Image (spheres, rainbow, N blue to C red):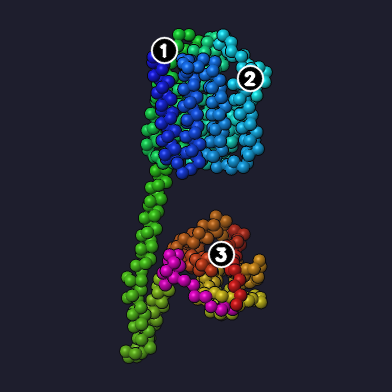
């Protein structure tokens, strides 16, 4: 009677798990295929139970039904593996059609031909053509295992662990069923332990379910896995005491020990993954909080800094113009001029921050107008030439024939100005050369210097456009920099549908910054 209760309990739990996962995944193919597989496993377990306790039909007829459900189940399991591995059915269209026809043929042959002959011994005598049955099962199992194994090798994180869960469950089920249906009958000459099939089937269903619901549960997954492993482990622990044969006691004890090892690693992997997921979620929440704080800060600049700074600039301009009387003291006048420059710098910094933030959130748009990019670059060169000559550097623009383009002139000018200004700041010998060309329907502008150069890692880092961050070499060479110019340039070029990238031979070998802009001819 204890056997019957255990079997019925396993059957019921398998169906409940299938229904539970389907409700979680009802809008996805994964949930539908898993429910179908769980129903087939439930029917397979029921037919196996009635094979051992025949009613209505003979044991031989129930065995036919069990074998038929075995074929259907392994076919559906293969379909489930394809779906959960995100592989298109079209890739396996022909093999699936052929295997479906073979499966249907074998199932039909089980009932209408002499494919299987009943014997009184512990095994059923099969005709030679029944090798197709075993070959089909092997093909399904081998291809499914290969897909999961390939996925576990080529993927990482969630997908890797998901493939491993299914592989462990499928592998343990195959080993267990093989022992029940081959090795134990060969050793004992009896089929009395086939009733354990539904219990091992429950382990397979549970492993597949866990591989799916792990997306929805966090710490609960660890608890469920511990309960599941504990339940199966307890069942396997009890088996040696129920089996009279000494050899089978040893075999079931070995299976129990193997399961303990697998269960330990499953729980360990689940726990570690849960911790990593929690840490990732915590970091994501902190990052989101910091991003909101940064946005709020930038938006508050207009009220807290821009508003009072505007009249400060105005008063300084009127004082220097003599509106309130002439300032005769040259030292005071010089300091007032310095204060005015600092106020202009602060205002420019704030305007740049607000401009970038406004473009990102869609509160500001581009003011497109006709622009002759060559003339714009020449103006920048003339403006920055004194700065280059002060450091004994050359600054030259090798002009080419360029079209008139629709651009936001002020933002493009600031983007190019920042890159040229940076090139001059971080160059001590040689100079800066600006070139331009039309290539692949894009305007490409190169700003090359003979300065400190950059490593590949540093280039990748800087092109992320992080505010207020600079490399160690740039800090040593030019301390007052704020690390904003490149960020502004990247954002302004990006809003025009272009991009900025850089090339460098390494430290001390100079750097070339490229600007790529799609041509919008007048």
Q: Is residue 126 above or below residue 420?
A: above
Q: Nearer the viewer, mark 1 or mark 2?
A: 2
Camera-side residue of 195 and 58: 58
Quadrant of image for the C terminus = bottom right
What is the x, y in percent for residue 140? 60, 30
Can you tell which of label 3 and label 2 is closer to the viewer?
2
In the rendered image, residue 259, in percent from the top left (x then y), is placed at 47, 23
Residue 137 in view in this figure: yes
Could you give the CA–CA distance between mark 3 and mark 1, rounded to whole angstroms? Answer: 72 Å
| Sequence-earlier tag: 1 or 2 | 2
Secondary structure under tag 2 reads loop
| Residue 446, position as x, y percentages in the image | 61, 68
Q: Residue at x 42, y 34 (%)?
A: 19
Estimate the x, y position of residue 451 in percent, counting from the top left.
Answer: 57, 66
Q: Residue 499: which numbered mark, if any?
A: 3
- Measured in 3D between alpha carbons, the distance from the residue under mark 1 to the one under mark 2, in whole angstroms, is 42 Å
Span of residues in magenta: 351-373
Could you tell me which secondary element the residue under label 3 belongs to? strand
| In the depicted structure, whether residue 390 falls above or below residue 216 | below
What residue is pinned by disc 2?
Answer: 113
Residue under numbered circle 1: 241
Q: Tag 2 or tag 3, which sits nearer the N-term? A: 2
Residue density around tag 2, few if under 14, some if 14–19, many if 20 or more, within 10 Å: few
């Amino acid at each position: 009677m204890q056997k019957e209760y255990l079997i019925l309990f396993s059957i019921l739990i398998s169906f409940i798990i299938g229904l539970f996962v389907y409700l979680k995944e009802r809008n996805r193919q994964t949930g539908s295929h898993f429910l179908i597989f769980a129903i087939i496993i439930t029917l397979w377990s029921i037919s196996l139970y009635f094979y051992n306790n025949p009613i209505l039909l003979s044991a031989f007829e129930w065995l036919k039904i069990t074998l038929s459900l075995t074929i259907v189940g392994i076919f559906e399991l293969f379909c489930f593996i394809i779906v959960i591995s995100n592989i298109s059915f079209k890739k396996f269209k022909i093999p699936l059609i052929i295997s479906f026809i073979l499966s249907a043929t074998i199932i039909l042959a089980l009932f209408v031909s002499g494919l299987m002959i009943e014997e009184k011994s512990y095994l059923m005598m099969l005709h030679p053509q029944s090798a197709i049955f075993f070959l089909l099962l092997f093909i399904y199992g081998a291809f499914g295992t290969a897909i999961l194994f390939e996925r576990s090798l080529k993927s990482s994180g969630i997908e890797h662990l998901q493939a491993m869960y299914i592989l462990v469950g499928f592998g343990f089920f195959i080993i267990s069923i093989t022992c029940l249906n081959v090795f134990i009958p060969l050793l004992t000459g009896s089929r009395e332990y086939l009733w354990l099939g539904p219990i091992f089937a429950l382990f397979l269903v549970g492993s597949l379910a866990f591989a799916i619901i792990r997306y929805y549960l966090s710490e609960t997954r660890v608890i469920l896995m511990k309960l599941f492993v504990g339940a199966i482990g307890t069942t396997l622990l009890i088996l040696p005491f129920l089996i009279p044969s000494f050899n089978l006691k040893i075999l079931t004890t070995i299976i129990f020990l193997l399961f303990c090892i697998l269960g330990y690693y499953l729980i360990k992997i689940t726990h570690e993954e849960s911790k990593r997921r929690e840490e990732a979620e915590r970091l994501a929440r902190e990052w989101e909080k910091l991003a909101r704080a940064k946005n709020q800060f930038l938006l508050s600049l207009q009220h807290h800094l821009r508003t009072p700074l505007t009249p400060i600039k105005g008063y300084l301009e009127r004082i220097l113009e003599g509106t309130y009387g002439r300032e005769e003291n040259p030292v005071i006048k010089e300091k007032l001029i310095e204060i005015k420059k600092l106020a202009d710098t602060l205002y420019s910094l704030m305007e740049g921050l607000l401009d970038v933030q406004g473009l990102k959130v869609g509160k500001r748009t581009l003011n497109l107008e006709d622009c002759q990019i060559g003339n714009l670059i020449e103006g920048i060169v003339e403006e920055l030439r004194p700065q280059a000559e002060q450091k004994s550097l050359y600054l030259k623009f090798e002009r080419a024939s360029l079209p008139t383009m629709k651009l936001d002139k002020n933002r493009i000018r600031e983007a190019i100005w920042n890159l040229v200004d940076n090139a001059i700041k971080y160059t001590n010998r040689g100079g800066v050369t600006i070139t331009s060309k039309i290539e692949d329907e894009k305007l490409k502008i190169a700003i090359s210097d003979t300065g400190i150069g950059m490593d590949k890692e540093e280039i990748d880092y800087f092109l992320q456009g992080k505010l207020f961050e600079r490399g160690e070499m740039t800090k040593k060479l030019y301390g007052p920099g704020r690390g904003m110019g490149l960020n502004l340039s990247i954002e302004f070029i990006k809003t025009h549908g272009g991009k900025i990238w850089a090339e460098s031979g390494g430290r001390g070998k100079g750097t070339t910054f490229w600007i790529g802009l799609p041509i919008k001819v007048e």
